[in-house]
Amino acid sequence: MTSEKTVTPDIESLIRAASGRPDEVRARLDALGLARVAELAVAEWTLRLDPPVNPLEIHIGLSVSDGGESADHTWVLRAGEPVRVLPGAHPGCDVRLRYDAADLITELWGPSRGRSSPARAYELATAMDPHFPPRERQPSIAAASATLTAALSARAPDLGALAVRYGSDKWGQTHWFTQHYERHFAPLREEPVRLLEIGVGGYEDEESGGGSLKMWRRYFPRASVFGLDYFDKSRFSGPRLTVVRGDQNDPAQLDALAKEHGPFDIVIDDGSHINEHVLTSFRALFPYVRTGGFYVIEDLWTSYLPGYGGDDRDFGVPTTMLGLLKTLLDDLHHQERDTDGEPSATESGLVGMHVYHNIAFLEKGRNAEGGIPRWMPRAPHW
């Protein structure tokens, strides 16, 4: 198994510091240096940007300061073109944003805590000239500025819209999953979760796939996101996103993956959809899901397809995904049954099951509420 270690310790340390006291942010600034912090901040900010809509090319400068020191970068935005980042302060900037480094760390990677006012200073670069900017540039300046500032909004982006933006099939194509994901994942959105998705997409084409991973990285602004695929998809690795090459049907590889990058708050199986592979992955990775987390299985429909190891005649066989879910219902209620020995990982750790069309959410916890008391009647009295 090979791994691109691009979910850097630097970013994870900033996320942890942003959740704590100001002295923790100060310590990370001192350890990393202003230039490195500004570089990471600009990279994070850029990956959150929606596609620009301004028809004219607009330059927006960012100055990050700490004491008497500053680090400058310039964004170049124009509709239909990739956003570019230039080092330094461009002399022709239309707008300049100024941030104290500690404030920017907190605004980028800290929980919102209900904040509504940003910590930035915003200024038109030529605000003192009454004849500038020309009227035809003003709408593009406003649109580009909105694109930049919206990326730091505490408002959660709609997951369906993110799926469409990044080309994930979890909404609006063959599936309608994002409404269910939002129902269960919204409480975790501002947490520094660790998310693993099996299946990057695009099969053997190294240039295809990655849409869902980018969607999760944007939806969870403080998350570390990991992708596992049988083919080499390392090109999609980047800030807070690491792609690992491996076989989801190999328990040893999955165990090594989880020990290196886990435990996980969320595991999503959107891989081969071959029933044997799904069961292997679940048995190997469910123990590495944290309490309060979720293990999600997509595309339950292949349970009925013999070509995927499903069964179109006997719907109760335990070797399919739906067969697994039916077995897990018994595990969820293991304390109501007369069983000997120690409970299994799913008997002791499964506390909830939420099954929708073609997708199941399995909730991890401590299944130890106790069974129905022995004095309760085991047969009706009448």
Image (spheres, rainbow, N blue to C red):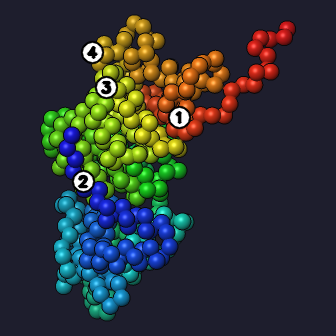
Q: What residue does disc 1 label?
A: 349
Q: Earlier in the sequence, mark 3 or mark 2?
A: 2
Check the picture and name the quadrant holding the N terminus.
top left
Q: What residue does disc 3 label?
A: 277
**Disc 1 residue type (three-letter):** Gly
Relative vertical location of residue 305 with respect to residue 108 in this rendering, above or below: above
Mark 2 and mark 1 in contact? Answer it, CB < 8 Å. Answer: no
Q: Residue furthest top?
A: 313
Res. 215 in view: no
Mark 2 and mark 4 in contact? Answer it, CB < 8 Å. Answer: no
Q: What residue does disc 4 label?
A: 307
User: Residue at image x 30%, y 23%?
Assistant: 274
The number of callouts visible is 4
Marks 1/3: CA distance? 21 Å
Marks 2/4: CA distance? 36 Å
Mark 3 and mark 2 in contact? Answer it, CB < 8 Å. Answer: no
Mark 1 and mark 3 in contact? Answer it, CB < 8 Å. Answer: no
